[in-house]
Image: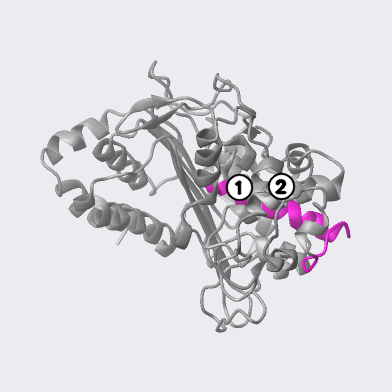
Amino acid sequence: MTIARTLLASLAVFALASPGAAQERLSADSLPRTGNAGPGLEAFDEAVCAMLVRHGIPGASLAIAVEGRLVHYRGYGTADEKGTPVRPETLIALSSLSKPLTAAATLKLVEQGKLHLDEPVFAYLSEIKPFSGGRVDLRLQRVTVRHCLNHTGGWDRTRRGEPLDGIVADVRKLDDVRTITPEHFLSRMWDVSLDFEPGRKSVYSNVGYVILGEVIEKASGQSYEKYVQEHVLKPAGATTARLHHGEVEYFENESHRFVDGGKPFPPLQRTFANAALGWTASSLDMVRFLCALDGSHGERLLRPETQRLMLTAPPPPYQSKSGEPHPGLGWPTTIVSEDGREFGYFQDGRNYGSRAFMKRSPRGVNWVLLFNGRLDPDAADKKLVGDAIAHVRARIEEQTEFPEIDYFKHLEKPVDRE
């Protein structure tokens, strides 16, 4: 079965499950589309556009590379209230897709001998003291660079809620008008005891990546933003990614963010957590990053031995089984075959006005899918959305034949418009 038939069949239930599906499909057909879809991959257009219409999201972009060849790069829908079409080069908030960028920068510093994976992170941040001035959980002093990278640092937001939200709420409650900085956030986190022994298990955490952003600055002697741009993004050819620093206006060529079925949202973000979820970039640049990370296109970002480190499961006391998914260094989900020849990793992200997905499949397919709104359906539709996203992911990874084309070679030419 061709990818077009397979994908359309898998999304048929999704499209028909809501009232007025025929009208929605007609609206999906009219959405702006920019960029290029490789021969035989046009079905992804219908898949993404159907999701936009069904959930009231204005725009999205999708880029796919196979063994270093760019075979698909598309923009869909609109980027702002004026109806500007989303293009493959349009910047869209990455949310937690920012974490692999921070992780790659950390691993570059490990390569340079400026960081060591098993060093305690607060040894680099000795000037940060508990906000209350009281006693702290001594286990915090054992949290290492490795723990922060693979989410084994000891913070469990399923027990106490998301610390990033809690700190913001506390500051507002205290009527503290200071701008929240990473130092202020971490000072407050010193007052919070850990939920489990560092290294014992992996629970997804933003806190560890806020810490890594500060550690990168201390170890490199540069700002976090400058180091990531110079040592990760620029070598990968991803030169347009940017961070917000409290601006009240969007960047040029940046998609606006939308919430609650299309209401515009300001560009302001929790800038103290930029290393965890602050970057904005295009799907095209992020697929370049993925290709540079696995060495399939452009300048290889990491040495082979560092890449192997990135893929390894956490050491004991964490328990893992060979061949099963595990957290890697910078990736909450990593899979490596027993012979080590096939490997993959996945990161998704969500924030106000943003939903993002990024993956390298074990078969060497790198893909990035970005939305400028949240996929926040009601309870009845929640599983349906999950199934639809899973189908898109599965079809990309199960496709056995891709066109023998490489749009990377043609990007100096104007992007085609339809």
Disc 2 residue type?
A: Gly
Q: Amino acid at mark 1?
A: Ala
Q: Which residues are magenta?
A: 96-119
* Spatial CA span between label 2 and label 1: 8 Å
Q: In which quadrant is the N terminus drawn? A: bottom left
Residue at horizontal 46 percent and vertical 62 percent from the top:
159
Give the structural element (helix, strand or loop) at label 2: helix
Report x, y in % for residue 193: 61, 62
**Measured from the top left, where is residue 292 in percent x and y?**
68, 52
Callout 1: SS? helix
- Which residue position holds label 1? 276
Of all residues, the one furthest to the left in this rendering is 19
Residue depicted at 80% across the width and 65% down the height: 119
* Residue that badge 2 annotates: 213
**Residue sitting farthest toward the top:** 82
Asked whether the residues under the numbered discs 2 and 1 touch, taking CB atoms below 8 Å apart as contact, a structural biologist would say yes
Residue 28 shown left or right of residue 187 in the figure? left
Magenta portion: prevailing SS class: helix
